[in-house]
Image (cartoon, grey):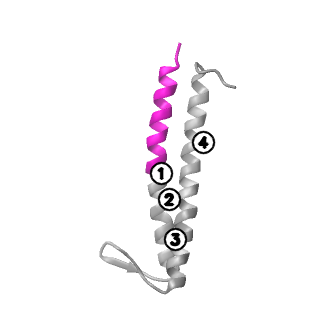
């Protein structure tokens, strides 16, 4: 069990959570894009409508970007924990 005063532990956990959230959101976006493509509908994103494989990749990239933002919030939280654990 890591000590609460280990600053590098919190930084490593923050990076791990960031990578995991980007990967998880990208996988969910890929699945959602495939479901939309199989349904035969286009995916409206702003003024554009994507269909087929371009819709799959557009949804995947947008979800990965959302995962990066979600992970960045957690990265800031773990950074604050790392700064608070300094002796």
**Who is closer to the viewer here, 5 or 53?**
5
Cα separation, mark 3 vs mark 2, equals 12 Å
Mark 2 surroundings: few (<14), some (14-19) or many (≥20) residues within 10 A: many
Question: Badge 1 local density, few (<14 within 10 Å), some, or many (20+)?
Answer: many
What mark, if any, has residue 64 been given in the picture? 2
Q: Report the mark closest to the observer, 4 or 3.
A: 3
Q: Which span of residues is magenta-colored?
A: 69-87
Residue 42 marker: none
Task: Determine which of the numbered discs, if any, sits on residue 32 in the image.
Answer: 3
Q: Earlier in the sequence, mark 2 or mark 4?
A: 4
Residue 86 vs 63, above or below: the answer is: above
Residue that appears at 60% across and 27% down: 8
Of pointers 3 and 2, the one earlier in the residue sequence: 3
Measure the C-alpha gap from mark 2 to mark 1. Answer: 6 Å
Q: Mark 1 or mark 4, which has the lower sequence index?
A: 4
Q: Which residue is label 4 attached to? A: 16
State the separation of the CA atoms marked 3 and 1.
Answer: 18 Å
Disc 1 secondary structure class: helix
N-terminal-most mark, 3 or 1: 3
Q: Nearer the viewer, mark 3 or mark 1?
A: 3
Q: Residue at x 46, y 28 (%)?
A: 80
Q: Position of residue 4 (x, y in %)?
A: 59, 21
| Res. 17 image quadrant | top right
Residue 37, relative to residue 23: is it above or below? below
């Amino acid at each position: 069990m890591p000590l609460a005063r280990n600053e590098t532990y919190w930084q490593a956990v923050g990076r791990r959570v960031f990578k995991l959230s980007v990967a998880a959101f990208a996988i969910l976006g890929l699945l959602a894009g495939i479901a939309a493509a199989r349904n035969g509908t286009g995916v409206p994103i702003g003024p554009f409508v994507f269909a087929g494989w371009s819709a799959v990749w557009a949804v995947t990239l947008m979800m990965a970007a959302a995962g990066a933002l979600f992970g960045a919030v957690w990265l800031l939280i773990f950074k604050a924990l790392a700064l608070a654990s300094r002796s």
